[in-house]
Image (tube, rainbow, N blue to C red):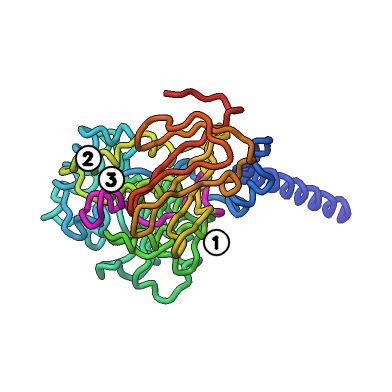
Amino acid sequence: MAKQKHGNTVLVHLVIFFFCAFSVSARVAPLLQNYGNPIFRSNFHTIYDTSNYGAFQLSNGLAKTPQMGWNSWNFFACNINETVIKETADALVSAGLADLGYVYINIGTVLGQLVPDPKTFPSGIKALADYVHGKGLKLGIYSDAGAFTCQVRPGSIFHETDDANLFASWGIDYLKYDNCFNLGIPPKERYPPMRDALNATGHKIFYSICEWGVDDPALWADKIGNSWRTTGDINDSWASMTTIADLNDKWAAYAGPGGWNDPDMLEVGNGGMTYQEYRSHFSIWALAKAPLLIGCDVRNLTAETFEILTNKEVIAINQDSLGVQGRKVQATGIDGCKQVWAGPLSGNRLVVALWNRCSNVATITASWEAVGLESGIHVSVRDLWQHKVVTGDAVSSFSARVDIHDCQLYIFTPFTVSHSVE
């Protein structure tokens, strides 16, 4: 009898093992498993390494592509109220931004002890969520994996279940979870309880981990959240934006559908950078599969800001179904200021950015070797800012003259791939 019981136990363990192994392998299939045809060089998978993606992704059905929407913090900071939120929802819809995918409206600061302030949110958060949902949008909220938020209001640590249930009862769709006053407890211990609490509500809530990149969350947060901040806070300057782009680039191999590297929100339209610099900002965030969370006042967009934020072709790069984060593949010139960033897209295409971080106009060349193409491959090149094919037959390399701090963004379509020219 003991032998039979032992045999049955072993059998059960084997069944569980094989079931788990199958489940995990099904979830972590290589993102580039179909990229092996003669178009690409033998080192293609090394250039666009995705080997660290997918170890036990959160798999709550969210974040199949990077999140898009708006966050109040960069422009309004703590000066937020329900009127601003409602007017922002109205503006996202009326301006056509919602139709492009900007659907999350995230309140970027805590409301005060998780009880809405009767002066700033007199109708309550549930009524506000209903209003936002009525517009076909989603509402996000902010809390902290510490004793207090960064504004020294009560955080959610040790109260995760109660707070998650409250968020769900309000109909919240997104939680940004910050890192202030963390009591010295390691983030790997502080962030999972809120994941478990959110999942236990039965209400799908996007879980955005804001750990500032301190403990390299790309190494562990894919098991916990839908996105994770890889850097400190961005500010509205060229120096901040470029520094953060480089810091985030280090973790490209770890991102993919279900979990994304987050280099912080967009500053486009806030006035601290030039048009060319904002265009670079948006191009690189799109290529790097970063969240596209607008950080300006969408009720008062300039024509230039509207043009950048509504470029459908650039947004399509960010939302491409393949879900591979693009990265820096070549840097030449003084301090490496003439840069080529690139990434694979669905349909055996590539997105390629020529980014001029130099102090003068520069000609930048993307060689086929750098972007992972075989040298003899013929390529059609489409400019995503001019919205036209600029050459139908590039071979071995492609060059363009790029303005100071500007970024030209292209789709490379090899001839052996069926494509249309608009």
The correct choice, above or below, for 334 with respect to 316 in the image is: below
Question: For the view shown, which residue lies furthest in the bottom direction?
Answer: 184
- Residue 399 seen in render: yes
Q: Earlier in the sequence, mark 1 or mark 3?
A: 3
User: What residue is disc 3 on?
Assistant: 105
Residue at left 39%, top 61%? Answer: 244
Instruction: Identify the amino acid type marked 3.
Output: Ile
- The residue type indicated by label 2 comes to Ala
Q: Is residue 215 magenta?
A: no
User: Which is nearer the eye, 55 or 252?
Assistant: 252
**How would you rate the neighbour count of disc 1 (Cα within 10 Å): few for under 14, some for 14-19, many for 20 or more?**
few
Residue 300 in the image, given as x and y percentages of width and height: 15, 44
Q: Which label was assigned to residue 89? A: 2
Q: Is residue 345 left or right of residue 4?
A: left
> Contact, CB < 8 Å: mark 1 with mark 3?
no
Q: x%, y% of residue 99?
A: 31, 32
Residue 173, compared with residue 264, is above or below; it is above
Residue drawn at x 78%, y 49% is 14
In the picture of the structure, the residue carrying the numbered disc 1 is 219
Q: Which residues are drawn in magenta?
A: 253-277
Marks 2 and 1, how far apart in space?
35 Å
Q: Is residue 42 left or right of residue 181?
A: right
Identify the secondary structure beneath mark 1. helix
